[in-house]
Image (cartoon, grey):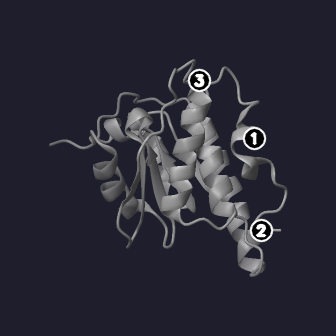
């Protein structure tokens, strides 16, 4: 079975990738000099563009979309997490949100953790649900939650977002989203 299906041969995004890699390297250089307060790098690989494989090893938390996983030949989140986590840097985690199926996450040497989806009674729009998942998951991690709990929170917040036309009501439903103090303060 062929794993790679590059649908875009002449990617016009090359400058974007090069600049992203430079920015991440600047962060890594900074972190090597600052032992007590490293900057955590998250990378979201959303579009099915083969060149995005180059940045998987750059993030501390790497979010992989269904479309990207499908381009790589994976039809479910657990298979994608198990296979693609081998590209990660040590101690990094891969996180695969899968819409109505929930999400999963895995570290290089850890086991896969899975969260169910939490759909609202009535879906108003899914616009912004993925971004909401990523933001809530990162916020939970920064507040000291483990990976399983963080993706569970991400799924809950994203599900609630689907029942709203915007994000304004999320802070009332999830008060921790508006708290100022984090693990990094």
Estimate the x, y position of residue 165 in percent, counting from the top left. Answer: 66, 20
- Vertical order, 15 against 127 (above or below): below
Q: Which residue is mark 1?
A: 171
Residue nearer the viewer, 101 or 13: 101
> CB atoms at circles 2 and 3 under 8 Å apart?
no
- Vertical order, 37 against 54 (above or below): below
Q: Secondary structure at mark 2?
A: loop
Residue nearer the viewer, 86 or 12: 86
Outermost residue on the front side: it is: 121
Res 11 visible: yes
Q: Which of the image's four quarters has the C terminus?
A: bottom right
Distance between mark 1 and mark 3 Cα atoms: 18 Å
Q: Which residue is mark 2?
A: 184
The residue lying at 40 percent from left, 69 percent from top is 108
Q: Secondary structure at mark 3?
A: loop
Distance between mark 2 and mark 3 Cα atoms: 30 Å
Residue nearer the viewer, 115 or 1: 115
Q: Which residue is mark 3?
A: 127
Label 2: how many Cα within 10 Å (few below 14, some 14–19, many 20+): few
Estimate the x, y position of residue 3 in percent, counting from the top left. Answer: 24, 44
Image quadrant assignment for residue 110 = bottom left
């Amino acid at each position: 079975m062929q794993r790679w299906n590059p649908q875009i041969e002449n990617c016009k995004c090359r400058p974007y990738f090069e600049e992203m890699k430079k920015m991440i390297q600047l962060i890594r250089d900074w972190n090597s000099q600052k032992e007590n307060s490293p900057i955590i790098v998250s990378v979201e690989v959303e579009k099915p563009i083969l060149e995005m494989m180059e940045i998987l090893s750059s993030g501390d938390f790497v979010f992989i979309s269904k479309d990207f996983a499908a381009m790589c030949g994976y039809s479910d989140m657990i298979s994608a997490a198990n296979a693609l986590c081998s590209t990660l840097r040590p101690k990094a985690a891969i996180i695969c949100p899968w819409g109505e199926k929930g999400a999963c996450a895995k570290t290089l040497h850890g086991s896969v953790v899975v969260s169910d989806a939490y759909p609202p009674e009535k879906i108003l729009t899914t616009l912004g649900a993925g971004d909401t998942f990523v933001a809530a998951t990162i916020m939970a991690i920064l507040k000291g939650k483990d990976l399983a709990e963080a993706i569970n929170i991400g799924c809950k917040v994203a599900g609630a977002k689907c029942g709203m036309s915007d994000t304004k009501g999320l802070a009332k439903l999830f008060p921790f989203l508006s708290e100022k103090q984090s693990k990094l303060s």
